Amino acid sequence: MFEFNVASAAQTQALGEALGALVRGGDLLMLTGDLGTGKTTFTQGLGRGMNVEGRVASPTFIISRTHRGKISAEGVKSPDLVHVDAYRITDLDDLETLDLDTALREAVVVVEWGEGKTEALSEERLEITLHGDALNLEELSTDLEGMDSGHRVIRFNPVGSRWQECDLQLALQQALEAAQAAEVEEN
């Protein structure tokens, strides 16, 4: 297990983007964190790193959203990204109707609020926990996109041997340092 301190949405997205370059079809990522700690912001970076079509948006109101992988200049299709918000799923039968075990065969599956619900999908997974300034629900607007409170701690817990194959911690550290340097240059 390892963690990074990030100070902005750009740094959160940079970590996601670096991870996006490392994931492959069959990977399960579980995102845990309070409302406003950057789960969707992280997934937006992941989608950019994976080279998926369209803008990655929160699946809060539709439960699951699939972002199709693009075909590279070399003719290789990146895996699809299946982005799930399991917050309102209380019955595991409801989770089964999403057919995530089938999607997981070829796609990268990201489940927000999946702790205690999706671990059985794969013995190999990456658990990502975001801690930081949660949103004040009394000040919450109806526009959930782009909400980002800035500073947070992002903890990565690789489960299984899959994540030992790549130097995940080093790749993410380098991406974060590059994002931090870019922010210093801008200011």
Image: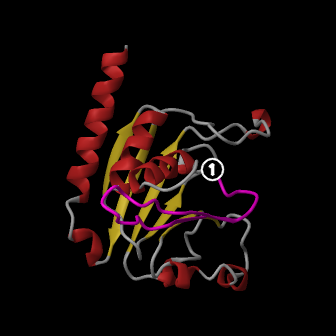
- Give the residue displayed 26% in from the left and 77% down from the top: 161
State the residue position of label 1: 57
Q: Please indicate whether residue 143 sits to the left or right of residue 20 in the image.
A: right
Residue 65: x %, y % from top left: 64, 63
On screen, residue 14 above or below 73: above
Give SS at disc 1.
loop
The x, y position of residue 27, in whole percent, is: 41, 72
Quadrant in which the N terminus is drawn: bottom left
Q: Quadrant of the C terminus?
A: top left
Q: Is residue 182 left or right of residue 119?
A: left
Q: Position of residue 84 (x, y in %)?
A: 61, 65
Name which residue lies at 79% across and 40% down.
142
Q: Given the current orientation, which residue lies at the most extreme top position?
A: 187
> Which of the two residues, 141 or 79, is positioned nearer the viewer here?
79
Q: Quadrant of residue 160?
A: bottom left
Q: Which residues are magenta?
A: 58-83
Q: In the rendered view, would you say 38 is above or below 8?
A: below
Q: Report x, y in % for residue 82.
A: 55, 67
> Is residue 171 shown above or below 63?
above
Q: Is residue 148 magenta?
A: no
Q: Is residue 81 in the magenta section?
A: yes
Q: Main secondary structure of the magenta part?
A: loop
